[in-house]
Image: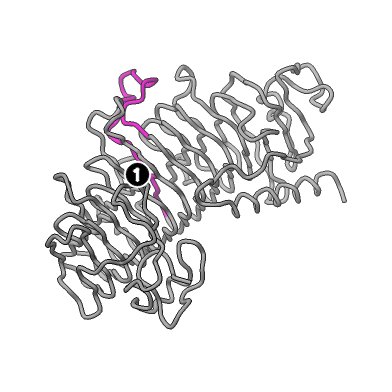
Amino acid sequence: MTLKMLNILTYILLAYLALGCKKEDPVEIFEIRPIVGDYYVSPDGNDSNNGSKTLPFRSIQKAVGIMAPGDTVVVIAGDYPECVTISKSGSSESTRLLIFSESLHGAKCSGFRIKGDFVTLDGFDVEADAVKNYVGISVAGKSNVEILNCKVHECPMGGINFAHDAVQGSNNARIINNILEHNGQWGINLIGSNGLIEGNEITKTVQHHPKGDEPGFQGNDADGLRIFGDNHIIRGNRVLDIGDPGDGGNIDPHVDCLQTWDGSLNGQPVMTNTIIEGNYFRVKHFTGKGILLESTTGNACHHLIIRNNIFEYRDIGVAAFSGEFHDIFIYNNVFNSILSGDSWGTSVALTNVTNYDYRNNITVDCHKEHRKILGGSGIVDYNLAWSSDGSHFTMEPGLQAHDLMGVNPKFVKYTGNFGENDYHLQAGSPAINAGAALSDVPNDFDGTARPQGSGYDIGAFEFH
């Protein structure tokens, strides 16, 4: 077996381990990263060296500048005060350019600009210097690029950005098991098709980052994910406490865990044909929404499956009321708002959506209105709605044939405080075997097959 083949097999093993990590700890996958490099970079190196393990380079830029398809660069732990541009491409899946931090988050630099196809970036600590760059990792119009296991933080204009250039979007992106912490405007932005966004943790996004005090760098948003284009999978991510009202950088932010729209930013396309599953969205800001769908220029947002997610939010869980929408399917989610305060708190706000399907969802403490679906056409049934204080609430449309209204779902743990609840079902829960049989929901939040009993359960977790 050749050295390069061994390296590819090792890389596949590490990617497999990354995909198999626990949801509550998405990036601490391994301590040893047994990667063999073609070139090495070290804080003790010199760019006049040959780049071997015994004579490493000093700069990451030097190493990536001489890579050929199939080569691997291993970067030893240390600080590298550079924003690295990767202009070359791998030629296929088996001849990727592989750039690894030898230890997880051990190699730190101020940014990456990826301008080639078939590139993998794995395990780096990225913090923008706000002098030469404002975005942590950016990819424009390139395909088959992977960002894995990186920590991207303190970047005033966004963490990871897969945008489009003048020709195309960034296709076949894989953004897996990264930490995005305290970045400005958004954690991950993706424009393209066939993306996989999985196992990332996005926290503390702010509207006005302290590093971005120049004109033009003070935006409106404090988002988790911004997703545009077709045929994505958004799975197992944790978007937590973005736009926190206690953070001085959030003056009057628009706060969405996941948002899509079309037209106004370089003509990007609205999200379509996408699966959103197994994510935990938690936002405490009074305007905070779980998912905001907008279609502003007549291009319909359509064919979305939103299943097995947990929403803890103040304003709206899933919003689709501005634009044109069809085929929006919302299954087996848990929506939890709060009873106090003046935010709306509804689970969904859908207006004139053609062919919607809202089934098997649990809504808890959604203030005075547990759902608001107006106009359009579709199915609503088999949902459970409960306010923990026994107060009156409304639903639009009202109680359906198989709905459970005002019924305690009997979660394993429920305090009403965001981040403290366990939405698994206890034995004897009225949600067990009470749901509709949905072929579009073969598993639950944990990956457990549905059904486990005589019927499908309501909510994000199948009792077993």
Q: Secondary structure at mark 1?
A: loop
Q: Where is residue 127 drawn, in percent x and y? A: 51, 26
Of residue 170 and residue 124, the one placed in the foreground of this image is 124
Label 1 sits on residue:
267
Q: Quadrant of residue 56?
A: top right
Q: Is residue 34 left or right of residue 290?
A: right
- Assess disc 1: are there few (<14), some (14-19) or many (≥20) residues with their C-alpha within 10 Å of its C-alpha: few
* Residue nearest the observer in this picture, 398 or 166: 398
Question: Left or right: 61 with respect to 289?
Answer: right
Image spot of residue 70 (x, y percent): 74, 43
**Magenta span main SS:** loop
Q: Please, what is the three-letter code of the amino acid marked with disc 1?
A: Gly
Instruction: Identify the residue at horizontal 40%, vertical 26% (top origin).
Output: 156
Q: Nearer the viewer, residue 400 or 230?
A: 400
Q: Nearer the viewer, residue 158 or 390?
A: 390
Residue drawn at x 24%, y 47% as measured from the top left: 314
Q: Quadrant of residue 78?
A: top right
In the image, residue 418 above or below residue 79 = below
Judge whether 152 appears above or below 278 on screen.
above
Q: Could you tell me which residue is drawn at 21 percent across and 56 percent down?
A: 366
Q: Is residue 320 above or below residue 303?
A: above
Residue at left offset 74%, top offset 38%: 72
Examine the structure image and report whether residue 161 is included in the region drawn in magenta: no
**In which image quadrant can residue 225 be found?**
top left
Answer above or below: position of 377 versus 82: below
Q: Which residues are magenta?
A: 205-229
Which residue lies most toward the right here? 1
